[in-house]
Image (spheres, grey):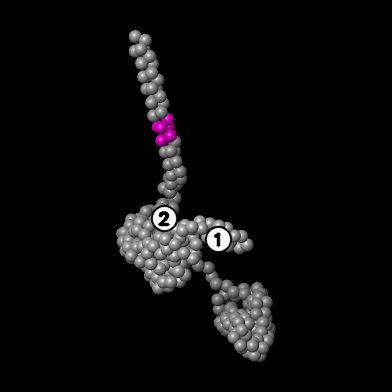
């Protein structure tokens, strides 16, 4: 009888422990679901029509981008297979740069780091990003497409020699053509396609919202311009026979813009004289430099003159009347 009672007590304790353990797991699961509360601010989208329209456009554009994403992955797979054929097993190196093969990469060597000498063990390693299989090739190409760390990958690619052999500086420069083509296809071409699809989706959504309006798009634009347009005014001196009026007339004319543009070009040429003097054109710098500087500098003083000319003596209409 005592044995059965003891067995029941142990069984009850074990059962209570299992129940408590399961409840603890349930509580942890519930706590983890609390993270979903961060989605509550999305409820405010319904209250703001413009924000809701933008959100709908984003969702719709994601649906349209899905087909392009499939083509993107297909081209990424093609480039990954090509990269495996070109660089498989060629991204290995020895910590001792004087050794090119794994067989020779044995023992110890002296590492001269600035003023310190350190004895290190030779190790045959592989670069963090490589093309030994398709999975790693996809990861490496994706890293290159993000623009982060791709110079190192490019350097390792042009240094390849043969499979299971160490690199040689600039051994295969033609391998850089692979990355040029890859950059043209992915970061330039596909990214622009994604942006264009999103812009087109926004335009289509905007046109759908305006279908219920009785006016056409151009008519609405004309009405908006008429409502927001303001009469043009300009300021000019009252007396047209003064020097100030002549300055104002010159500043507001197209000739002033062309003159300033010409002077900026001449000023750039003057600044280039120092570079030209290195190429044995010292005489040109000596003869033309001071002359151009003397003529260009006063022209840039036209800024104060331009501000002096159009002082607000009289407000006129578009025709100056």
Magenta-span inclusion, residue 118: no
Residue 5 appears at what percent x and percent y?
A: 36, 12
**In the rendered image, which quarter contains the N terminus?**
top left
Residue 111 appears at what percent x and percent y?
A: 55, 61
Q: Nearer the viewer, residue 44 or 286?
A: 286
Q: Which residues are magenta?
A: 23-30
* Horizontal side, residue 74 vs residue 129: left or right: left
Q: CA distance from mark 1 to mark 2?
A: 62 Å
Q: Residue placed at 65% from the left, 73% from the top?
A: 312
User: What residue is shown with label 1?
Assistant: 110
How many neighbours does mark 2 have within 10 angstroms: few (below 14), some (14-19), or many (20 or more)? some
Q: Check disc 2 and report its element: helix, strand or loop.
A: helix
User: What residue is shown with label 2?
Assistant: 54
* Horizontal side, residue 54 vs residue 293: left or right: left
Prevalent SS, magenta region: helix
How many neighbours does mark 1 have within 10 angstroms: few (below 14), some (14-19), or many (20 or more)? few
- Quadrant of res 184: bottom left
Residue 151 appears at what percent x and percent y?
A: 47, 65
**Which label is found at residue 17?**
none
Residue 171 appears at what percent x and percent y?
A: 43, 71
- Quadrant of res 134: bottom left
């Amino acid at each position: 009888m005592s044995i059965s009672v003891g067995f029941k007590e142990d069984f009850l304790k074990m059962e209570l422990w299992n129940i408590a353990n399961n409840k603890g797991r349930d509580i942890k699961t519930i706590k983890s679901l609390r993270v979903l509360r961060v989605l509550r601010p999305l409820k405010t989208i319904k209250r703001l029509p413009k924000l809701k329209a933008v959100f709908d456009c984003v969702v719709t554009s994601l649906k349209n981008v899905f087909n392009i994403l499939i083509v993107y992955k297909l081209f990424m797979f093609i480039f990954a297979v090509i990269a495996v054929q070109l660089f498989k097993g060629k991204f290995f190196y020895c910590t001792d740069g004087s050794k090119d093969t794994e067989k020779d990469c044995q023992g110890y060597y002296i590492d001269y780091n600035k003023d310190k000498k350190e004895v290190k063990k030779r190790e045959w390693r592989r670069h963090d990003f490589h093309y030994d299989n398709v999975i790693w090739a996809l990861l490496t190409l994706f890293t290159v497409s993000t623009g982060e760390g791709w110079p190192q990958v490019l350097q390792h690619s042009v240094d390849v020699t043969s499979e299971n052999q160490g690199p040689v500086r600039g051994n295969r420069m033609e391998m850089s053509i692979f990355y040029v083509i890859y950059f043209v296809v992915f970061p330039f071409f596909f990214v622009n396609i994604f942006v264009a699809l999103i812009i087109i989706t926004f335009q289509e959504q905007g046109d759908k919202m305006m279908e219920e309006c009785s006016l056409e798009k151009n008519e609405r634009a004309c009405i908006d311009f008429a409502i927001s347009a303001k009469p043009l005014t300009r300021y000019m001196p009252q007396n047209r026979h003064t020097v100030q009026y002549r300055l104002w007339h010159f500043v507001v004319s197209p000739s002033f813009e062309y003159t300033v543009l010409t002077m900026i070009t001449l000023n750039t040429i003057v600044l280039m004289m120092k570079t030209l003097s290195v190429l044995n054109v010292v005489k040109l710098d000596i003869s033309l430099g001071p002359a151009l500087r003397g003529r260009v500098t006063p022209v840039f003083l036209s800024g104060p003159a331009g501000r002096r000319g159009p002082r607000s003596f009289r407000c006129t209409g578009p025709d100056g009347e």
